[in-house]
């Protein structure tokens, strides 16, 4: 419940940031966001974007980029580390769009926060310009979303330090490597049994969000199909022992 409340609060904050066009308003919003940061455990924000064709549409891409921007802003305010990748058929089929620390320079808190908007704009320019070429370069023969959990664990280990892993997977959820989640609607029990099968890494202490489930470029799957996807990814995440697991169809939830 606490995790859900934090998601709602930060989503609301993201909305207020968008509505405050003045520098003073943006600084105030970032000052409020800074209060949610844990200096002892800055975020290691990993955003994994499904680059397969089933969710390839301008509208979905725009929603994903809005979610990415909110995470970039939070990472910059909290002096964290950010990695953004696009993936498709396997753990090897990934393209890195951005990978760097987002620690703002400045002698005071406000001086550092005033650098955040330019830093966010710079990151988003790089992500947006690299996104389409990366998607085009990836094989489109399938989608292996489960494999991204292992890559997340490996990256956090490589990063080291006292960072807290904040993993966000932006995907329609229709994995078809190892298990075909789009074949038919799954009951909660069936989805959870399937989620018990793959090997998963330990992500203790991490926050995991899988957002965009069921959001496809053409048509909309029945609600029962989406509910099955939610059950599958929730159970899969819980098996990693992450401290927070969220699986939803709404990209806005990815802003935490």
Image: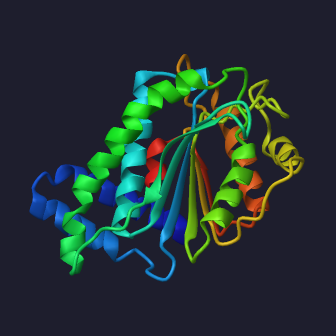
Q: Is 179 located above or below residue 58 in the figure?
A: below
Q: Position of residue 209 (x, y in %)?
A: 58, 53
* Residue at 79 percent of width and 35 percent of height: 186
As drawn, is 137 to the left or to the right of 176?
left
Q: Position of residue 194 (x, y in %)?
A: 86, 43
* Residue at 70 percent of width and 59 percent of height: 153
* Residue at 47 percent of width and 43 percent of height: 251
The quadrant in which the N terminus is found is: bottom right
Question: Can residue 231 be spotted in the picture?
Answer: yes
Q: Position of residue 172 (x, y in %)?
A: 60, 33
Q: Is 112 located above or below residue 141 in the figure?
A: below
Identify which residue, 147 or 58, lies in the foreground: 147
Identify which residue, 175 or 6, lies in the foreground: 175
Q: How many discs mark residues in the rendered view? A: 0
Where, by quadrant of the figure, is residue 36 drawn?
Answer: bottom left
Identify which residue, 135 or 194, lies in the foreground: 135
Q: Residue furthest top?
A: 218
Q: Position of residue 235 (x, y in %)?
A: 76, 54
Question: Can residue 60 be spotted in the picture?
Answer: no
Where, by quadrant of the figure, is residue 232 drawn?
Answer: top right
* Residue at 46 percent of width and 32 percent of height: 131
Q: Is 155 located above or below residue 177 in the figure?
A: below
As drawn, is 198 to the left or to the right of 29?
right
Colour scheme of the rendered structure: rainbow
């Amino acid at each position: 419940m606490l995790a859900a409340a934090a998601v709602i609060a930060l989503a609301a904050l993201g909305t207020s940031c968008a509505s405050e066009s003045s520098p003073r308003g943006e600084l105030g919003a970032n000052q409020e966001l800074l209060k949610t940061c844990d200096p002892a455990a800055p975020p290691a924000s990993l955003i994994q974007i499904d680059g397969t064709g089933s969710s390839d549409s301008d509208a979905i891409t725009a929603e994903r980029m809005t979610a990415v921007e909110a995470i970039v802003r939070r990472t910059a305010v909290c002096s964290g580390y950010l990695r953004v990748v696009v993936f498709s058929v396997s753990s090897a089929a990934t393209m890195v769009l951005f990978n760097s620390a987002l620690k703002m320079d400045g002698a005071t808190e406000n001086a550092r926060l005033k650098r955040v908007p330019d830093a966010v704009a710079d990151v988003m320019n790089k992500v947006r310009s690299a996104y389409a070429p990366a998607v085009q370069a990836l094989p489109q023969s399938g989608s292996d979303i489960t494999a991204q959990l292992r890559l997340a664990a490996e990256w956090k280990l490589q990063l080291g330090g006292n960072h807290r892993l904040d993993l966000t997977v932006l995907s329609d959820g229709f994995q078809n490597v190892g298990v075909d989640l789009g074949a038919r609607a799954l009951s909660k029990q069936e989805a959870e049994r399937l989620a018990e099968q793959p090997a998963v890494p330990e992500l203790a202490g991490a926050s995991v969000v899988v957002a965009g489930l069921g959001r496809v470029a053409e048509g909309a799957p029945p609600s029962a199909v989406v509910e099955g996807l939610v059950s599958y990814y929730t159970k899969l995440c819980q098996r990693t022992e992450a401290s927070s697991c969220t699986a939803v169809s709404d990209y806005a939830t990815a802003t935490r």
